[in-house]
Image: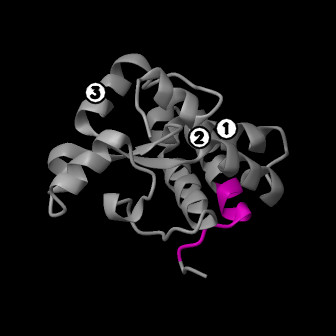
Amino acid sequence: MSKNAISIDQLKLACEHVNAMKNAGVTENLAIRTLELFADVYAKLHTGGSASPHHIRHVELRSIKARKLLEADPDLNPGDSLRVEHGTPRRAFARKVLDLHHEGKLNKTAMDKLVARYWKLAVITIDEDLCLNKVARSKMFDTPEERWAQAGIKF
């Protein structure tokens, strides 16, 4: 078990932090950032990853275009042409956690279901990311796959 594993109680505390900060006049943009990080780390550890920052070498799901780039140049500098993409934007995922908390339903079972349905990472190209920005960046979709399909990203 990682020292940085996030518990349900810590997620609840982060949700309360969001509420307290917003009540104090802080914008959601700042108030929700800790919850975004905690929810992301919880999900990553729950799916077998580590608490370390995301890196393309640690993400197995890769778009067809990303795979071709890596096959052509295995020593490719990832920052120049690839990125790790959250299938559900971190902010949208954190809002779903916050909704569970507000409903009094934030528990391990509910959180694990949320992770299974919405939390997925993929490696995509910068060009695919630009396309995603145009058609699906701030929209919520039923699944990450639906969001990626909307942007024309194929796996």
Q: Separation of disc 3 and disc 2 at Cα?
A: 21 Å
Q: Please give the residue where the numbered disc 3 appears in the rendered image.
A: 130
- When the figure is inspected, residue 27 is found, relative to residue 54, above or below; the finding is above
The residue closer to the viewer here, 117 or 2, is 117
Q: Please give the residue where the numbered disc 2 appears in the rendered image.
A: 93
Q: Mark 3 or mark 2: which comes first in sequence? A: 2
87 left or right of 82 in image: right
Q: Main structural element of the magenta stretch: helix, strand or loop?
A: helix
Q: How crowded is mark 3: few (under 14 residues within 10 Å), some or many (20 or more)?
A: few
x and y, in percent, of residue 58 in the image: 39, 65
Residue most extreme to the top: 135
SS under mark 3: helix
Residues at circles 1 and 2 in contact by the CB criterion of under 8 Å: yes
SS under mark 2: helix
Q: Mark 3 or mark 1: which comes first in sequence? A: 1
The residue closer to the viewer here, 20 or 5, is 5
Instruction: Name which residue lies at 35% across and 41% down.
Output: 64
Numbered circle sitting on residue 96: 1
SS under mark 1: helix
- From the image, which quarter does the C terminus lie in? top left
Instruction: Name which residue lies at 53% across and 61% down.
Output: 41
Q: Separation of disc 1 and disc 2 at Cα?
A: 5 Å
x and y, in percent, of residue 128 in the image: 31, 31
